[in-house]
Image (tube, helix red, strand yellow):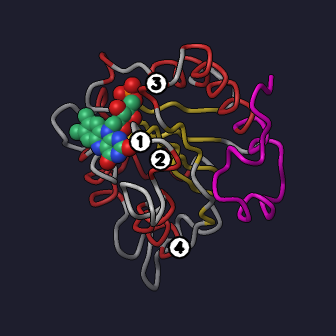
Amino acid sequence: MKKILILFSHPKFESSRANAVLVDHIKDIEGVTFHDLYERYPDFHIDVPVEKALLDQHDVIIWHHPLYWYSCPPLMKQWMDMVLEFNWAYGPKGTALDSKICFNAITAGGSRDLYCSAGTNTFSVNEFLRPFEQTANLCGMTYLPPFAVMGTHQLTNDELIQYAHQYGALINLLQQDESVGDFKDCAFLNDILQLNTD
Ligand SMILES: Cc1cc2nc3c(=O)[nH]c(=O)nc-3n(C[C@H](O)[C@H](O)[C@H](O)COP(=O)(O)O)c2cc1C
């Protein structure tokens, strides 16, 4: 069974609605390590050896965060800057992350229809996430499309719970599945699951 590391980054988790529901549903799944970066590093001083050891021990890495200004909250970026070192994560001797699976799990205030050339946000979510995609590529990881919960302000609690079940089902699938070939072909990982799973 694949081991899953969720690197969670939310600067105001205490006032979260969407992520509170998602996290509550997935954090205790067997084989999942839920790692809350803001809880662990409120001073932004990341323990690089600890983070590298965690990465070593897992097969699937999830960058889980709310979308803030079309990107991730700052501690997530700090984590990338500090942990993904030359000749460890990338570079001629940088093979530590080779073949691991990686993707973003995001929540966004804007709904899906606003993220296109005709919409307010001009670009798709996948386009905004390109720096993550290329970081994963450079580190030899297999990057999958995002799991996304969008239009969060309009979602009812029941809808959020359905998304949480969907996230749990995705994690179960990733734990079991040997090949993630089909996963790359969709715009969102949500699309490979039926809403209302579980
Ligand atoms: C500083 C800040 C920046 C944000 N930037 C975006 C953004 O670029 N795009 C978007 O769709 N929503 C944006 N939002 C809305 C958040 O993504 C949304 O409130 C969050 O995902 C909801 O999850 P939560 O209830 O767990 O906080 C932003 C919110 C904050 C506070």
Amino acid type indicated by mark 2: Trp
Q: Tags 3 and 1 in contact by the CB under 8 Å rule?
A: no
Nearer to us: label 2 or label 1:
1
Q: Residue at x 80, y 27 (%)?
A: 197
Foreground residue, 186 or 182? Answer: 186
- Look at mark 4 in the image and give the residue it sits on: 137
Residue that label 3 marks: 18
Q: Which mark is residue 52?
A: none
Mark 3 and mark 2: span between their CA atoms?
16 Å
Q: CA distance from mark 2 to mark 4?
A: 15 Å
Label 4 or label 3, whichever lies nearer to me, is 3
Disc 3 secondary structure class? helix
Residue 21, x across and y down, in percent: 52, 18
* Image quadrant in which the N terminus is located: top right
Q: Is mark 1 within 8 Å of ligand 1?
A: yes
User: Which of pointers 3 and 2 lies earlier in the amino acid sequence?
Assistant: 3
Q: Amino acid at mark 4?
A: Asn
Q: What residue is shown at x 80% (from left), y 36% (from top)? A: 194
Tell me which residue sits at (49%, 71%) in the image. 139
Look at discs 1 and 4 and give the one toward the viewer. 1
State the residue in front, 99 or 162. Answer: 162
Of the numbered discs in the image, which one, if any, rests on residue 110?
Answer: 1
Q: Does the magenta segment cover residue 190?
A: yes
Q: Residues within 10 Å of mark 3 (few under 14, many from 20)?
A: many
**Picture residue at 56% right of the left edge, 23% below the top:** 27
Instruction: Read off the residue under disc 2.
Output: 63
Ligand 1 image-quadrant field: top left
